[in-house]
Image (cartoon, helix red, strand yellow):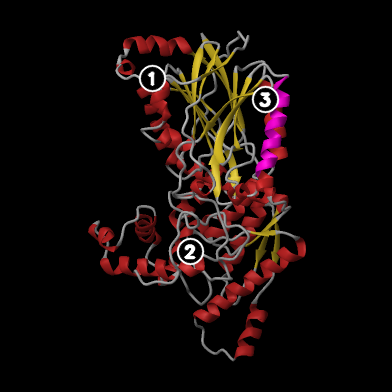
Amino acid sequence: MFLNIALCQINPVVGGIRVNLQKIEGIWERVDTQAHLVVFPELSLCGYPPEDLLLRLDFVRSCERSLKELLRVSEGMSSLLAVGMPYYEGDLYNALVLVGRGQLLGIYKKTFLPNYSVFDEKRYFRAGKEPLILEINGVKVGFSICEDIWHPDGWERFYALSGCEVLVNINASPYYRGKYEFKENFLRARAQDNIAYVVYVNMVGGQDELVFDGRSVVIDPEGKVIARASSFEEDLLLVSLDIERVRRKRLLDLRLRERQVEKTRVVSFENTLQKGIEDARVEASPKQEEELYKAIVLAIRDYVGKNGFQKVVLGLSGGIDSSLVACLAVDALGRDRVVGVFMPSEYTSTESREDVYELAENLQIELLEYAISEIYRTYLETFGSRELTVAEENLQARIRANILFYLSNLYGWLVLSTSNKSESAVGYTTIYGDMAGGFAPIKDLYKTWVYKLARYRNSIKPDIPERVLIRPPTAELRPNQTDQDTLPPYELLDKVLELHIEEGMGLEEIVALGFDRELVKKVLRMVRRAEYKRRQAPIGPKLTKRAFGKDWRMPISGSYF
């Protein structure tokens, strides 16, 4: 006995209900004669996260009309559809609906609503309290949504005790570095513990601050991955599950006999499909550098595409940050949609000029040059400035930002900021200057990782001049300046920042790990003082366990550190 399941890993548009509906219908029609059950991700009908659109009744009603359209389409389909959508029934639920042969056969309402990190689901949804079990051709399937499977007291054990051989979990699970390995190991344990197949269907795509990596996966009762979809791109994965494997294993393993559960209603569905599918694909999961690079490329592509921009523009300084962002933008959009702007001052070195032009030539992008020396001197004469202070340094950065935003207004281009996480963490960036932009691709990337990704990109095609990778980083806002004039070495700074931001450690805890007390105190004070800047920074993709943005909600006014 077997069950054919189609895992439909799509990139929906938030609020694009009609577009999403057409995509879902098209894929369903393609696989209808090959699958018993066709599964789409969490809230894929409306996109995730829809945020306060969910507080609009017209939006909710539009989702209801789309469900009616799916019911109409299902009359001509032989397979059963499981799709995520907001469902209104006296209150709003994050739901999975089962649609087949013109009928709404079942509704599962998400039980555990995450309200931490980037999640805010208790603001929008009521928690469900009922399981949903489907019996299709004699095979029992239990359904859950994203967070539900992470809870030890979730529905998975109930489903297994109720005889379910397959556990289907639909997701809009955002990416961050290191998450996938942990998640897959966790899902392996769920499959082994419940002696069942785990079918995990994840969303893919970039949505403002979030990136969804896909990598939908099927795990057998022994914890082995038998199917895995592609990472960071849409995919359709068909798999046949040998149900007899579950039944044989359960006869030999007595754990599920030891507890009884109350009987629950079972939805029944029959499908005459008799042909199985050959071995499913198991796509390789990328290593960390490749994974991060693909995540940022997808974030840029979707932010630009979903917001209707035709081109992006960024300042090129000859430094590592702007060089990496230029490569990411070209890989996301193509060279014809990326414009670089070189804005030299009297402090810009010959090496920086050479590196900018070499990078632009290697990438074959349009390069504009606007010297800022005359504009800068006009400012100094206007205000009678005589000394070179931080104010004059920041002035240069703000002049450059004005040029970029003038071009943005003139041509409708999106300005890409090139600030990284290390700089924004400690305020080593100019507000309304180099931190300004419409989108910040490396906002959540520490400086040490900027270098790692630049080297990774050069291993594919060496577009970044080698000198950029070995020169001491510098803002070039005064003679002979380097970042280390003000900051600790980035290798040391990033370790302290990661412990403080990602791990939540305070001064004493970090010092106890062997770091110098005065250095840690200085770094934490800088993080605290830069909060007002970060609140005014452009958004960028979440790449770490805790990103500045929805993940990080610190008061601006206060004196804890």
**Viewer-nearest residue: 64 or 384:** 64
**Viewer-nearest residue: 253 or 209:** 253
Looking at the image, residue 229 sits to the left or right of residue 483; the answer is right
Looking at the image, residue 6 sits to the left or right of residue 146; the answer is right
Mark 3 or 1, nearer chain start: 3
Give the image location of residue 464, x and y in percent.
57, 53
Give the image location of residue 406, x and y in percent.
71, 69
**Which quadrant holds residue 24?**
top right
Mark 2 or 1, nearer chain start: 1
For the C terminus, the quadrant is bottom left
Q: Which residues are magenta?
A: 60-75
Disc 1 residue crowd, few under 14, some 14–19, many 20+, Cα 10 Å: many
The kind of residue tagged 3 is: Trp
Marks 2,1: beta carbons within 8 A: no
Q: Residue at x 62, y 34 (%)?
A: 10
Q: Does residue 286 belong to the magenta stretch?
A: no
Q: Residue at x 42, y 16 (%)?
A: 163
- Please name which of the two marks, 3 or 1, marks the residue nearer to the observer: 1
Badge number at residue 424:
2
Disc 2 residue crowd, few under 14, some 14–19, many 20+, Cα 10 Å: many
- Please name which of the two marks, 2 or 1, marks the residue nearer to the observer: 1
Badge number at residue 28:
3
- Please name which of the two marks, 2 or 3, marks the residue nearer to the observer: 3
The kind of residue tagged 1 is: Leu
The kind of residue tagged 2 is: Ser
